[in-house]
Image (cartoon, helix red, strand yellow):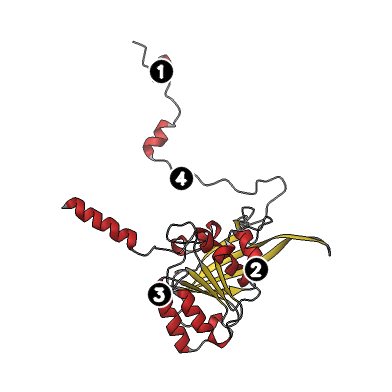
Amino acid sequence: MAEAALRDLSAMLESSPRDTVPVLPALRPVLPGGGLRPGSVVGLGGSGSASLGLALVAGVSRHGGADGAGGWCGVVGVPDFGVLAAAGMGAAPERLLLADDPGDRWPDVVAALAEAVDLVLLRPPERPGAAAVRRLSALARRHGCVLALTGPFAGDWAGVRLRLRLDEAVWEGLGDGHGRLTGRRVRVTAEGRDAPGAGRGARLWLPAPDGTVAPDETARPPLELVGGAVSAGAPVHPPRPQAPRSPRTAARHAAPVRTGAAAHGPGEGAA
């Protein structure tokens, strides 16, 4: 009976929905749980939100799916979606479904995709109505599909619990009026109810010189200011104060007591 119960439990765990929808390894430190919550709605903002969308599609396409060998993604209303750039980040183009211009029926297109794919990258062509928001959010929750919103109307979607923002972007490789762009350093921040506290962030290459998404290992912690003036030749960091010693420790470090004749007081002779 115990073995049958264990088999039933194992079957239930295998059939239960996964905890997170995977992302690229470089983005995992930014997200609570290391991935996206199935059935959630994620807002993408900042000056490089298009690149964030590419990175999310690449992560799900490469690491998603029931067996982790790759998932399916839909891209709706993004005619300038860079398939080549997404492939450079790791996406599998054969698992991407593109609907560049769905027109007024974009909610129906998203609804159909939400039943079949792991992630839908959506740029709403207009301010979404309350009915469309409720319908599509409910379908995403039911089927475990992530809706990733980008574009000027992404902030008008009610119920977004996680927002990813890209800022502090600095391109590398461009000299004084000449050169070739090789990569971009950015900061990605996660905010919202699914990222409690002051938010989570990480500095990344998006993209790196080889087209991938990678941690920016050259980032340095901010310099710590030293109070007071420092004279020439003096150490920058003053010595740390030492903790007071206990009486027993102080006794151990005291000067040793001499033995023999010198240890006797006046008038005492040696034995």
Give the Cα separation between the discs numbered 2 and 3: 28 Å
- The answer to whether 270 is drawn above or below residue 145 in the figure is above
Label 1 secondary element: loop
Q: Which labelled disc corresponds to residue 141?
A: 3
The disc labelled 1 sits on which kind of residue? Thr
Q: Work out whether mark 2 precedes mark 1 in sequence or the reverse, and give the earlier one.
A: 2
Which of the two discs, 4 and 3, sits closer to the camera? 3
Q: Which badge, 4 or 3, is on the more N-terminal residue?
A: 3
Q: Nearer the viewer, residue 269 or 214?
A: 214
Evaluate if marks 1 and 3 touch, with contact meaning CB atoms under 8 Å apart. no
Report x, y in % for residue 118. Answer: 47, 68
Q: CA distance from mark 1 to mark 3?
A: 85 Å
Q: Position of residue 141 (x, y in %)?
A: 40, 75
Tag 4, which secondary structure? loop
Q: Which is nearer the N-term, disc 1 or disc 3?
A: 3
The residues bearing labels 4 and 3 have C-alpha atoms spaced at a distance of 57 Å
Q: Quadrant of the C terminus?
A: top left
- Between the C-alphas of marks 2 and 4, the distance is 60 Å
Q: Amino acid at mark 4?
A: Ala
Q: Residue at x 47, y 86 (%)?
A: 132
Identify the amino acid type marked 3: Arg
Give the mark nearer the N terminus: 1 vs 4.
4
Q: Say if 142 sits above or below 63 in the image.
A: below
Q: Which mark is on residue 259?
A: 1
